Image (tube, grey):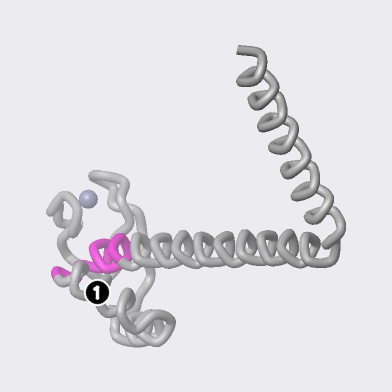
Amino acid sequence: MRISHLLRAGFLGSLAIASAAGCLALQDDASNAAGAAGCFACSGFLIFIVLAAIAINVAILVWVARDAKARGMDNAVLWMLVVFFLGIIGLVIYLLVRPQGNMILCPNCGNKKLQASVKCPHCGAGS
Ligand SMILES: [Zn+2]
């Protein structure tokens, strides 16, 4: 009983010493720790950039879909795919290809539509 108690205390004591030594070793290697922290911050920054890029992409895709629909293009989804796969090049192509003209608010539904279009692409009302 007594011996097992002592053994247990010894085991715990050696564990404490080992963990303290490990801690000291980590603190000793301060430059390595700083490097790891810098790497962590760097990867966090990269993740932020990737998330921001995805958010901008989604915003552009939504804008293209709305703009294409407002201009009476029935292939808005196709243009979304073009911009999605070609990125900024696809966006430039869309801006060149889309029907040009002034956008006005539909008097019937209040959505944007081309001034030149006879029928509103949103509600179908003739102007
Ligand atoms: Zn309308």
| Quarter the N terminus occupies | top right
**Quarter assignment of residue 63:** bottom left
| Quarter the C terminus occupies | bottom left
Residue 69 drawn in magenta? yes
Residue on which the image places disc 1? 81
Left or right, 11 with respect to 77, comes to right
Residue type at numbered disc 1: Leu
Left or right, 24 with respect to 75, comes to right
Where residue 80 appears, as percent x and y from the top left, is: 27, 71
Where residue 123 appears, as percent x and y from the top left, is: 16, 49
User: Which secondary structure type mostly characterizes the magenta part of the structure?
Assistant: helix
**Quarter assignment of residue 60:** bottom left
Q: Residues within 10 Å of mark 1 (few under 14, many from 20)?
A: some
Q: Work out whether 30 lies above or below 20.
A: below
Identified at 71% across, 63% down, the residue is 36
Q: What secondary structure is marked by label 1?
A: helix
Identified at 58% across, 60% down, the residue is 48
Identified at 64% across, 63% down, the residue is 45
